Image (cartoon, coloured by chain):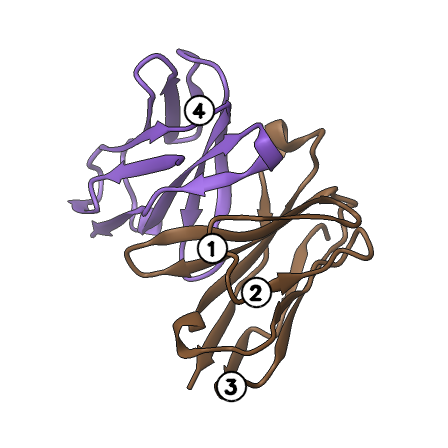
Chain colours: A purple, B brown
Amino acid sequence: EDKVVQSPLSLVVHEGDTVTLNCSYEVTNFRSLLWYKQEKKAPTFLFMLTSSGIEKKSGRLSSILDKKELFSILNITATQTGDSAVYLCAVEAYAGNMLTFGGGTRLMVKP
Amino acid sequence: EAQVTQNPRYLITVTGKKLTVTCSQNMNHEYMSWYRQDPGLGLRQIYYSMNVEVTDKGDVPEGYKVSRKEKRNFPLILESPSPNQTSLYFCASSSTRDSHNYGYTFGSGTRLTVV
């Protein structure tokens, strides 16, 4: 059974701090790993990672995948209160484009 | 605007009364999927569809049905809802050719309460 585990469960930081969110997975026929940000509505797409060692960046957010050790990290530098959200990691398998989600990390950024 | 539209956004219903949650996408995506999100359990896949008339079970299909008669629509049917189906539901779609660039697009969610 495919499995995705995120840590920590929740995190409280102050503005300007840097945070690292973790995602480990076990999946058969791995295709890609995706990161989403969920505020009080639908998850919004952040990154899709398919290759090990290649960092993806978007502003203050970056992510990298390690396919040997089966994990990914999402880094947010110089956090802002607008970064407060639940961050979801999902792994896509080749079989049926199935996405398996982790339980999410709830990030709260205090002013 | 490219989007996935779910209706209704909120629904309170009684046990056993059949209901349908609609999902429509305007991006000509082949792939569509339904998820439920529950506290502490994350998002779990209910059913997915690779294309018209092609559907398959996800992780938690019991108590649900789907159909894919047209590419744009993927309704979720609860024939006899029960209180354990109280949840937040999301529909998502993706192009099987471009999912590597754009990921999956989610609808705004349907909060269902079954009493």
The residue under label 4 is: A57
The residues bearing labels 4 and 1 have C-alpha atoms spaced at a distance of 34 Å
Which chain is indicated by disc 2? B
Which chain is indicated by disc 3? B
The answer to whether dots 4 and 3 both sit on one chain is no
Circle 1: residue type? Val
- What is the total number of numbered labels drawn onto the structure image? 4
Q: Are marks 2 and 1 in contact (CB under 8 Å)?
A: yes
Which chain is indicated by disc 4? A
Which chain is indicated by disc 1? B
Q: Are marks 1 and 3 in contact (CB under 8 Å)?
A: no
- At numbered mark 2, what does the secondary structure look like: helix, strand or loop? loop
- In which quarter of the view is residue B30 placed? top right
Query: Image point 36% across, 52% down: which residue?
Result: B42
The residue under label 1 is: B60
- In which quarter of the view is residue B97 placed? top right
The residue under label 2 is: B64
The residues bearing labels 2 and 1 have C-alpha atoms spaced at a distance of 9 Å
Query: Residue A32's x, y, as percent?
Result: 50, 26
Query: Residue B79's x, y, as percent?
Result: 60, 75
Circle 2: residue type? Tyr
